[in-house]
Image: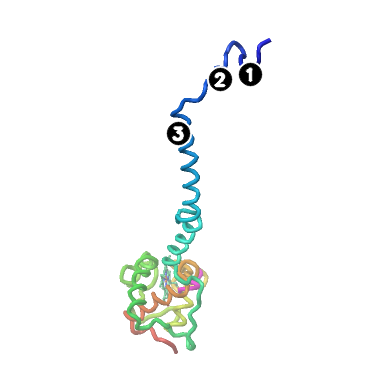
Amino acid sequence: MSDPNKEFDGIRQGDNPLPEWWKWVFLGCVIFAGIYAVYFHGFSNWGTGAYYAAQIEDYEKEFPNKNVKIESNDGSNPFRGNQGAISAGQKTFQTYCVACHGPTGEGLVGPNLMDKEWLHGNTDLELYETVMKGVPMERTKLGRGPMPPHENSLGSEKVYQVLAWLASKNLELKPSK
Ligand code: HEC
């Protein structure tokens, strides 16, 4: 009986050596893998750690200090008159508020924010509460729809920026009572 490793079902194993070129390619792969592993773990920033850190950085650029509370004693907006905050706030308004309050804040579904009439108060503190917490349907004055809360989507810093922009446009918005 012949060796089953050499012949099976009429198929014969040749036991030829691997071709020279194949061995060199194999050796090349092993060397490359070694160098690559050292480079990847030791010197590159291609790992998931760096990628994750970059993602966090991007996120924080978009939603800076999401949960940080900016305390001011009388509830007035600390960003009043701050040009950087005002222009950042205008951009945020264009993204998050125009759909309901219109491109210049003159009102659509939501009320006009540029006039003298205020449904939920005209101080920084009252507006801050309105924008952060929103106005649920049962508390709306107009009944045209709720004002959504922005405490999670924008956070305090961005809300104060929007209100700084609003205060620069509408002088009826007072720092405090
Ligand atoms: C989905 C629509 C919608 C979006 C988006 C929205 N609002 Fe409103 N907002 C409303 C409605 C509706 C009211 C009025 C609620 C009522 O009838 O009492 C309101 C009320 C307000 C008030 C109170 C106005 C007053 O007269 O007292 C302020 C201030 C305000 N919104 C600011 C904002 C800001 C700033 C943003 C963006 C960050 C925003 N809103 C996004 C719908 C919206």
In front: 170, or 49? 49
Screen quadrant of the C terminus? bottom left
Q: Residues within 10 Å of mark 2 (few under 14, many from 20)?
A: few
In front: 137, or 26? 26
Instruction: State whether label 3 is within 8 Å of ligand 1.
Output: no
Mark 1, mark 2: which one is toward the viewer?
A: 2
Along the horizontal axis of the image, is 29 left or right of 90? right
Q: Earlier in the sequence, mark 1 or mark 2?
A: 1
Which image quadrant shows ligand 1?
bottom left
The residue singled out by tag 2 in the image is: 15
Screen quadrant of the N terminus? top right
Marks 2 and 3, how far apart in space? Answer: 20 Å
Q: Tell me the kind of residue under disc 1.
A: Asn
Q: Earlier in the sequence, mark 3 or mark 1?
A: 1
Magenta span has 90? no
The residue singled out by tag 1 in the image is: 5
| Residue 6 quadrant | top right
Marks 1 and 2, how far apart in space? Answer: 10 Å
Q: Tell me the kind of residue under disc 3.
A: Val
Q: Tell me the kind of residue under disc 2.
A: Asp
The magenta segment: 131-136
The residue singled out by tag 3 in the image is: 25
Q: Residues within 10 Å of mark 1 (few under 14, many from 20)?
A: few
- Give the percent coordinates (x, y) of residue 68: 50, 75
Give the secondary structure at mark 1: loop
Total marks placed: 3
Give the secondary structure at mark 3: helix
Instruction: State whether label 2 is within 8 Å of ligand 1.
Output: no
